[in-house]
Image (spheres, rainbow, N blue to C red):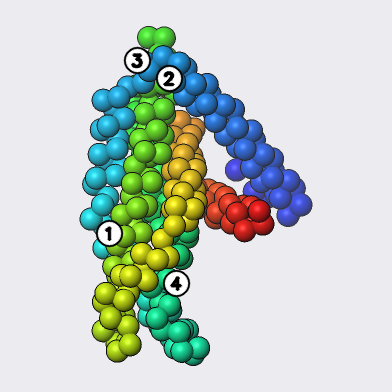
Amino acid sequence: MKGQNADPVTRLGLRTRDVLDGARAMTIFTGSFLLAAGAGVRRPRRLRLKEILAQVQRAGADAMVLLACLSLLMGFVLGIQAMVTMALFGAEARIAQVVTIVTMQEIGPLLTAILLAGRSGIAFVTTIATMKSRGEIDALQARGRNPVDDLVLPRVLALMLAGPLLAMITTAASILGGMVVTLWIPQLSLFGYLHGAMDAMSTGFLLFGLAKMVIFSGLVGLIGCFQGLRMGGPDAVEKGATSSFVIALLLIILVDALFNFLYHLY
C-alpha cells in the first residue's frame, strides 16, 4: 500500500530502491553459495551426493523427452529459414553448416536454459517457499543446519551438471530436425547434410556453448532458490515463481550477449 498514492517520481524511486535491495540481497546470497561450494570442494563428504543425483534426475532425465521434441521442431524451423535464405545465393549445400553452428552456439544453450528456468527454477521456488511457510527452514536453522548447504547447494550443482548434458541433447535433436529440409532440396542428400554437419562441428563451438550452459544453469538455480527463501508465505509463491522466471530470462539474455561480445571480439 505504501507509495501507491505517491507521485510517479516517488513511485519510481521506491521501485528503484526495491530493485537495488534485491540485487544486494542476491549478491550476499551468491556469496553464501560460493562459500558453501568452496567448503564442499575442500570436504567432499559435506556434499549431499544422493540429493544432487536426485535433483539431476528431476531436472535432467525427466526433461529430456520434452526438450528433444522442442529441439526437433526448432531445428526444423531453422532448416526451413536457412533453406529460404541460402536459396537466394545458390548455397543450399551450406544449410547443414548454418543449422549446426547456430544450434551449437546459440539455440542449444538458450532453449535449454529457458526450459530449465520455466521448469526447474519455478519448481525450486515453490518447493523452498512451501518448506519455509511450513516452518521447515526454521527447524533446519534451529538444529544448526545451514539452508544453503542443505537446500541450495545440491539444487544448483545438479542444474550445473544437468544443463550441459541437456544442451548436447538439444543440439543433436535440432541438427536432426534441420535434416528434414533435405526432402525439398534435390541437390542436398541426407548423407550430404550429415557430412556438412560433421564438418561444421568444432571443439571450440562445443566448449563455447557448454560454458554458457554452465553459467545459465547456475543462474537459474541460484535465482530460483533465492526467490524461494525470500517468500514470506504461501500467497507469495506465485509472485516469487513469476519473478524467478522473468529475472532468470533477463540475466540469461544479458550473459549470452556478454559471452558473444567477448568471444567474437577476441
Q: What distance separates the C-alpha of mark 3 from that of mark 4?
A: 45 Å
Q: Amino acid at mark 1?
A: Ala
Which residue is disc 2 drawn over? 40
* Pointer 3 local density, CA inside 10 Å: few below 14, some 14–19, many at least 20: few
Which residue sits at x=41%, y=77%?
95
Name the residue nearer the viewer: 125 or 133.
125
Q: Earlier in the sequence, mark 2 or mark 1?
A: 2
Q: What distance separates the C-alpha of mark 2 from that of mark 1?
A: 33 Å
Residue 59 seen: yes
Which residue is disc 1 drawn over? 68
- Residue 124 horizontal/vertical position (percent): 37, 38
Which residue is disc 3 drawn over? 45
Nearer mark to the viewer, of 4 and 2: 4
Nearer mark to the viewer, of 3 and 4: 4
The N terminus lies in quadrant:
top right
Which residue is disc 4 drawn over? 98
Q: Secondary structure at mark 3?
A: helix
Left or right? Give the position of 250 relative to 129.
right
- Residue 218 horizontal/vertical position (percent): 46, 39
Q: Secondary structure at mark 1?
A: helix
